[in-house]
Every structure is written in structure tokens, then in C-alpha cells.
Amino acid sequence: MATQLRINGKDVEVTAPPDTPLLWVLRDEIGLTGTKFGCGVASCGACTVHVDGEPTRSCVLPVEAVAGAEITTIDAVNGTVAEAVQKAWRELDVVQCGYCQSGQIMSAIGLLSQNPSPTDQDIDDAMSGNACRCATYHRIRAAIHRAADTLEG
Amino acid sequence: MLHFLNQAPQPAEGFTIAKVSRRGFLKVSGAGLALAGFATTAEAFPRWPHGGHAMPHGVRTDPLVFVRVDPDGTVTLVAHRSEMGTGSRTSLPMIMADEMEADWTRVVIEQAPGDEPKYGNQDTDGSRSLRHHIQMARQIGASVRHMLAHAAAAEWGVPAGEVAVEAHMVRHGSHEAGFGDLAEAAMALPVPAFEDLAFKSPSDFRYIGKGKVQITDLRDITTGAAVYGADVMLDGMQVAVVARPPVVGGKVKSFDDTAARAVPGVSAVVELPHSIPPAGFAPLGGIAVVASNTWAAMKGRDALQIEWDGGPHAGYDTQAFLAEMVATAEQPADTVFRNQGDVDAAFAEAARTFGQTYTQAHMAHAPMEPPVALASVTAEGAEIWAPVQSPYACRTDVAKALEIDPAQVKVNVTLLGGGFGRKSKHDFAIEAALVSKAVGTPVRVQWTREDDIRHSFMHTVSAERIDVALDGEGKVTAWRHNSVAPSILSTFAPDGGHQFFIEQGMGHVDMPFDIPNVRCENGAALAHTRIGWYRSVSNVPRAWAVGSFVGELAHELGRDEKQMWLDLIGAPRVVDPVAEGYPEDFWDYGEPYQAFPIDTGRLANVLDMAADAIGWGREMPEGEGLGLCVHRSFVSYVACAAHVRVVDGTIRVPEMHFAIDAGFIANPERVESQLQGAAVMGMTLALHSGIHYEAGAVVESNFHDYEMVRADNYPENVHVHMVPHGFGVHSTGVGEPGVPPVAPAIANALFKATGQRKRALPMGAQV
């Protein structure tokens, strides 16, 4: 029942049953703990990873569905957009408890990769699947604008 | 929030404040040894009394416990409070570093395990971390600086008073040494007495009050490297998921685990002992499914066949219960907490009376990280890794559950993915310990979101009735407030049906209006679930009631809402609790009242600030309105001014202003973030947060039916205005006091926008 995955640029063979959500394969089998469990029903976004560059909720994504796809997690996400987003997050002290921020950052990178200068409305639309109980929405919006400015500049 | 059963009210000598000026409490630190460049005046460090010493194990000031200086100059500072997003893990070490003259870039923070005899109280709740430890952090910093200076003086043969300590360096004339060079000698010196210390002048602060230090875990959080409760891995560990009794006090009648054991990866099924209320933080019991990974444990649990015995609370139905509570609140109560003047006479003589009833549903905290804990139990003892707010209480309770000595238990504190009071209750860590012991390997107990929402220690459900008597000029002559809510105490002791002193002190008996006749009553209500504390606790329903009522009264009397608040608050005064009929065991957030009195001038001031900032009195377009609320809690004063706009029937909050008077503010950047958070959590609870029970069990299950506001509709432009104070004005709470005024400010603004008055929380997102 082995499944071939490509995670953070490396080929990995995993033995979890094919219906296992990618989240638990990442966390329990591979030991990549940056991606978080929040709800298990794709309703909070804490588990967001990139599948072929697209922000995707890994808690409801059977591992068999992503065999062969390029999976990227917060633990190793890189590139110009990712660096701009992470830098903006730090400059604006976005986080409070930080638990949801892996997912927030992965969604923000996804947004800016598609849309380099999003409006407030674009940000709200792209980010409303990512919940934050501490409520860092104000700074997330500001940080996405700042990252966009960095990328433009 | 509270270490309820251990913290007594402060002694009654606090009740003579009317005769004593506040400055009388600002004790001079005493003339100490003058180290070069450091002030020793009372202005530099006016020591003030606070409630930290009354907490279990009090406050420790031993620098050798909290500071290590390595030969390479690295300064390791211990954070003994849990980090759940408020920033205390950064702010307290930052204060130590500043006072020590340590360079922040050379500081490493180490998290303390649960050990209160060593570190002092570690209950991270009640908005107390800075309030109880800001002085301690400065004292520790000053002690280490003193020891470094004296070590250098001895080595160089110069007077210690002439040695300068600055930015990780120690100098005298041509002599110069780094902290690391002096570390060994300095840390071997006797710890100086407080009286011998010199403190920095506030004008010399590098980090304190500047808001420029980033939280210590920021980089790790943005790269996924930060370690939360579920991120600790041990060799041979397994994962367990627990099926718990749907009804509190229920138990397993029978179960069949054949299908569960057949799930690949499942290794064991363990029945946990059920708890009989009042059970404190003991787990609910149920059936744990243990597996090699989380998904297998979840599938195994789904496959369990369990027949439950519901127990005495199997009939709990919140709709019916709330109706009963409202009826109770609208009758004279059997218990009176505060009695000032003659309320009955004032009502009998009133020109008119006015009253309304406000309610709030149960709430679950729903931190983004669901409860989770890893335990490794062996013959030698137990080690726990968990996101807990009270690691020492956790250690004690784990020892009790395992029937071993607390000395055999170590509790390591990870980062908390949100807390809000839920993680003060470490039932999940006890579960992990019990399952680990049963199966003989390390075990992580992982709660799902459904577990979290259904098996929380719920914020209470409440009905609040307020009536006022008015004279011919519309002046309020009497105030009667009957607060009815199952008590937190029921979780710890046989349920007497009444609120206890801590709940009374949170917005009920401390109602600060200048009204000659006041009665605060408490009709009985018994608990039918585990009642816990949720960020801001009883202040949420009380501010909801009082704040909404002021808005309603203003409308009823045809007065401006802000003027109504100011009329009720009256001329600035420091409340004398004795003269105003407060209960003898009045609880002022555990603080000595004289040092933290209710000052209505400060209350009115923040109201003015928030109202001015939002442009109070301006003409608003159709479908929009402004609303206000001001509330004192956790000894801080917070006003909220909200702008509500109804768009296609949806309540939106385009603008919100907070004004906060929290005394001296050490980290304004984190105060701003806490209040931004309060705006959003306040709007969430105003619109959405309702937990309901039917047939004893929780109806809601996940974020689809227990919603929170999201990026597409939150208070968009939140502005935070802080009353500036010097170090001598006692620092007060920040994490919680922002939340209570939000919902009433929104409701008051919504009324202006639509004419609809909401009296039940949650009010729903649509009008």
C-alpha cells in the first residue's frame, strides 16, 4: 500500500492507508509538524499546504489523491513570494499564539503567487477560509499588502 | 483566569481608601548603593503592593532561578508563565533584560517546567502575568546588574558605585569586560537585598514601553518550527483518541470494541474511569483508542459501539433552562450580595421605573489548537509535554491520578495554540498520563475539534435583570441587578446554586455608577455541565447587560448615550466599597483594594477618549450607527466605541476604537494586538458564540455551527488608544479586559442603525 509522494522537493514513500488525510501523513509518518490540525473538516485552514502551488486543506485530502503531485509545506516553503510574506509577517509582528499562522502564511503565499497586488477585497476572499481565534486579521491584511509592495518594488 | 480555590479575598483593611491618597502607597525603594548612571529614587522604582504574593507560591525574585549568564555572554532568561499569544513569554524577559542592561540579541529564553516552589505562581490566567511580575522582573534584572558590577569592582579593585554597566558591557576607567567574562564571579556573589539595588530611570529604558521587541518565537512560528502540544515526538510513542460520555456525569454502560481493534494500526482500547461531578479537572472518562497514528485512532474510535448511561444531567436542555433562568431573574432573589441605601423605598417613591433582561448562551473557548498532551509514564514516574496554563497544578493533578508523588512528575510546557482559559483545565494531560500508564508506551492524547466543542469547560449561561427607579427629573435613584448563572464553583464543590465572591466581583457588585440605592442580587441556578472560565469570565454577561441597559435607558429617556454614561458615572470619585454597601469579601481581582481602587475618573476618561476618537455625535447615514460601552475589569478600564453598518442584512463593524487605562504599559505593541484580538473575539461572541444542549449533550460540533468571524467580516479598522502613565502607576490586566465592552457597544450601535434592540447573546449575524 505504499504511496509515492513528492514533498518539499523530495521523493518520499509512505505506507499509510490510501484514505489517510495528507495532514496525518505529514505529521505522523514523515514528522513534518509545521502543518497544524485545527478542525479536520477543511473549515479553519490551519492545515493548509500547497499542492502543485495551490493552497489546499490537507486534513480532508486523501494521500492517494496527491501521489505524484508537488506538495509544499510551511516547513520548507521558499522562493521570492514566500520570503516576502514571511518577512512581512515578522516586520508587522502579525502573530499572537501563532498556531494558525502556518496555514495563514501558506494561503497568503498562494494568493500573492496568483495575484501580486491584491485589494482588500481580494485578501478577504482568499483568506476567509483561514480562521484565527486570537484574531490577527488586521495585521494579516497589512502584511499581505506589505509583501505585495516588496514584491513590486 | 483564577486559581479559585486557593486564592482568598484580600483582607478587609483595603476598605479605608476614602481617607488615603493613592500616592500614600507608593513606597520609596530606599536609598541604595548608587551604581553609576542609575537612579535610586522612588520615581525610578516606586514599589507598590499587589496580589501576586497572595497567589499559591507567590512571587519569587531570586535571580539565580531566572537568570543564567554563560561565559560566551549568552544570557538565558526563564519564562515561567505559559505563552498563549499574549506575549508574556517575551515581555517579562524583556523587562529583566532592560533592567540588567543585557543586549536583547544575546538573550535566550527558556521555558520553565511546572515547579511553583521554585519559580513562584505559574497560573497563567486572570490577566496577571505583567501585573504581578513587572516589579519582580525589574528586581531580578537590577540584581544581576548589581552582581556584575560588584564582580567587576572586586576584580579591578575599584568602588562598585563607580562601575558602569551598559549594553552587555561593564566598564570602569580603562577597564572593560563583557557579561560573559564576569559571569562566573558575578553569579557566585550573594544576591543583593532589594534595598541595596539601584534601578534605571524610565528615561533610560531601551525596551520597556517601546513596543519594538518582537516576540521571541516569531521566526519559528513563520517557518513552522515552533513547538506546540502536538509537535513533541518520542520514540515508541502512540496516539490516542477518546470517546467521552456525551453528558457530563455520564458513563459507559457497555461497549464493543471488536471493530475498533480491527482497524489497522490500532493497538489497544482502554476504558478510563468516569468522573462524578464535582470533579475539578478530572477527565470525563470514556473509551480511549490507542494506535500507531492519529488517523487510525480516529477511525478506531468511530468504530466503537458504546452504550452510555446519561446520568443526572441527561435532561439538560438549554432552551428550557434559559427560560427558567429568565423567570428566576425577574423575581426577587433569595440572596443579596450588595445592599446600599434603601432600594425598596426608592422604587416605592419612584416617578417611574424601567427594567430589561439580558441573556447569554454557553460558550466554548475553541482555541485553534485543540487540547492535546503527550505523556510518558514509567515505573520511575511521569513526564508530560502539554500546552497548559497551569503547569504546576497539572503536575499535582497528574500525580494524584497516577497515585504517585508529585516529585515523580515533570510537566514541560510547550507553546499554547490559544488558551482563553480552556488550557487552565488540564483534563487532557491527565488522560494522556492514564492511557500511557495503561499501555506502557508514551501516548499523545489528541482531541478533535468536535471533542473540544462538546467537552469544554463551558462559559456559564446567564440571565441578567436590571431595574432602575427614576425621579421626576429622570435621575436614577435606585439600581437593582439580579444576576443568575450557574457557578464555576460547581465544578469544584457541591453546587449551592449561587455565585461566589470571584464571580460577584466581575461586573456585578462592583457596578461603579453613582447611585444612592443599589442592590445586587443572585437568584439560584444549578449547573448541568462543567462550568469553567473563558476569557473575561463573568464580565462578559455583566458588561453585556449593563452596557446594553445604559443604551436602552438613554433611548428611553431621550438622552445622548454618552451623556447617559457620564450621568450614571457621576463626578470623579474613588469608590469606597464600605460606604457603597459592597460585600465584606469583595474581590478586586485579588489585588489589595487600596492600591487598585475603582476610580470613576479613569472610567469616564477612557469613555471620553473612545467617543472622541470615533467622532461621537456625528450624523450617520441610514443603516449605520455608533455605540459605546465602558467597563472596568482585571483592574483596567476599557472603553469601546463601535461603528455598525448593516449591509444586505449583515452586521458589519467598519470601525472600532478602544481606549484603555492599564496603568504603566511595558509592551504597547502587545497591548495593541491584545485589543485587536478582543475586537474580533468580542464580535465573534456578539454574533455567533452559542453552545446549546439537548438531552444533556452539546448540539454544536465544529466551526460550521460554532462559527467565528473571519477575514471577510471582522471589525476592520481597530484603533487602540492607551492612557499614558509612568512606571509608578500600577500596571493592570490587558489580555481580558478588552473583550467585555465589545458586544454591548455593537448592540448599542446596531440599535442606532436599525432600531432593533438585541438582548440575547449571541445575537446572530443577520438583522
Image (cartoon, coloured by chain):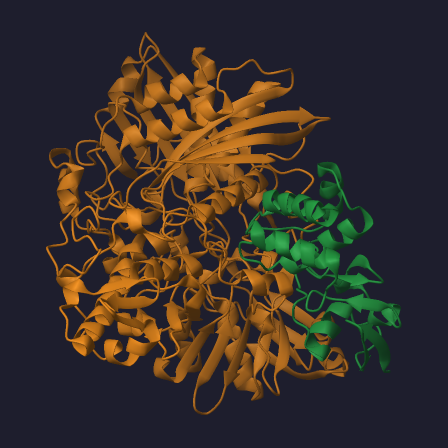
Chain colours: A green, B orange
Relative to B626, B64 lies left or right: left
The part of the image, by quadrant, that contains residue B506 is: top left
Q: Is residue B355 above or below residue B61?
A: above
Q: Position of residue A147 (x, y in %)?
A: 68, 49
Query: Residue B311 location, x and y as percent?
Result: 54, 62
User: Is residue B416 in view from this perspective?
Assistant: yes
Q: Residue at 83% across / 74% down in the picture?
A: A6
Q: Which quarter of the figure is the N terminus of chain A placed in?
A: bottom right
**Is residue B759 visible in this depiction of the protein?**
no
Of the pair B67 and B314, the residue shown nearer to us: B67
| Residue at x 51%, y 59% (from the top left corner) | B312
Residue B299 vs residue B544: left or right? right
Q: Could you tell me residue A12's position as x and y percent?
A: 80, 80
**Outermost residue toward the top in this view:** B472
* Viewer-closest of B564 and B78: B78
Q: Is residue B338 above or below residue B441?
A: above
| Residue positioned most to the front | B174
Q: Quick check: A52 left or right of B36?
A: right
Residue appearing at x 19%, y 71% in the figure: B150
